[in-house]
Image (cartoon, rainbow, N blue to C red):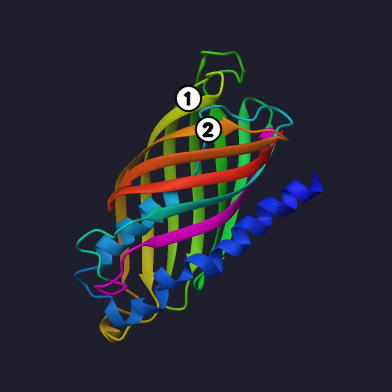
Amino acid sequence: MKKLLFAVLFAALSASPVLASDYKFDNFAANVSAENLEAFTKDMGGLLGSGTYSTGRILGWGGFLLSARGAVMPKPSDENTALGKDSEVMYMPWIQGEIGLPFRIDGFIRATSWDGLTLAGGGLKWGITRPVDSLYSFQTMITVMAQSGVHKDFSLTHYNANLVISFKMPVVTPYIGGGVDYTKLTVEGANDTSLIGKREYTTTPRASAGLNFKLPAYMDLSLAANYANYGFGGEASLGVRF
């Protein structure tokens, strides 16, 4: 089991050098403007809100899940040129740990340090329905989360709330979810010094649809498509679940 946990952590950490070439937060100071700041904040909200859940079923009392997760934005929204006009694919990997608590509640924490952005936070999941593993049963869940991040050129605070529904099948569990992302971003460094200290507040909807697979040796895999301010994106999770 220790080998499995190590493999999950290693997968998340080793993703950085593979993906980092397309992710350029250091371009923010040179390209941010009063015109593109709102779109950048909205896109970040959708990216950071992704991957909060991977099924509509809570873990239940005593349950545990440790996973490496990631979200991808294939292309920023047209108005988002805050990382440069040539900015294309944007990635965000992180580690998320979850534990089952009484009263149909799960608690979770998440963290990452990626391309100069350090981010940490957590939240709660509440099962509207009692957690069961019966075939062809529906499970519904509400999640809420808060997280904060710091980069040398900006800082942000992000909140979201989601409603998730899943349907248990023999091999796979499909799920759909929808939520709202609230993001506050503060400019800390910019070539245009008039923007330093400027704060942007945005609220945007987000939706996802995915498949959750229970693999051998307690492994848990989820793949999903999402839709946010930037358009269509993707998210994935690979973890160890009890």
Say if residue 158 shows up in the picture. Answer: yes
Pointers 1 and 2 in contact (C-beta within 8 Å): yes
Residue 88 placement, left or right of 61: left
Highlighted range, magenta: 82-100
Q: Residue at left 27%, top 84%?
A: 192
- Is residue 17 inside the magenta stretch? no
Q: Residues within 10 Å of mark 1 (few under 14, many from 20)?
A: many
| Extreme residue toward the right, this view | 2
Marks 1 and 2, how far apart in space? 9 Å
Q: Residue at left 54%, top 66%?
A: 16
Q: Residue at left 52%, top 14%?
A: 137
Work out whether mark 1 precedes mark 2 in sequence or the reverse, and give the earlier one.
1
Q: Looking at the picture, does residue 11 appear above or below residue 101?
A: below
- Is residue 92 inside the magenta stretch? yes
Q: Mark 1 highlights which residue?
A: 166
Say if residue 98 shows up in the picture. Answer: no
Q: Marks 1 and 2: which is nearer the front?
A: 2
Q: Residue at left 24%, top 58%?
A: 77
Q: Which residue is nearer to you in this view: 32 or 201?
A: 32
Name the spot of residue 240 as percent of width and height, x first. Answer: 68, 41
Q: Mark 2 highlights which residue?
A: 212
Query: Looking at numbered disc 1 in the image, what kind of residue is underneath it?
Result: Ser
Name the spot of residue 238 as percent of width and height, x first. Answer: 59, 45
Residue 182 placement, left or right of 97: left
Residue 189 placement, left or right of 38: right
Q: Secondary structure at mark 2?
A: strand
Q: Residues within 10 Å of mark 2 (few under 14, many from 20)?
A: many
Q: Quadrant of the N terminus?
A: top right
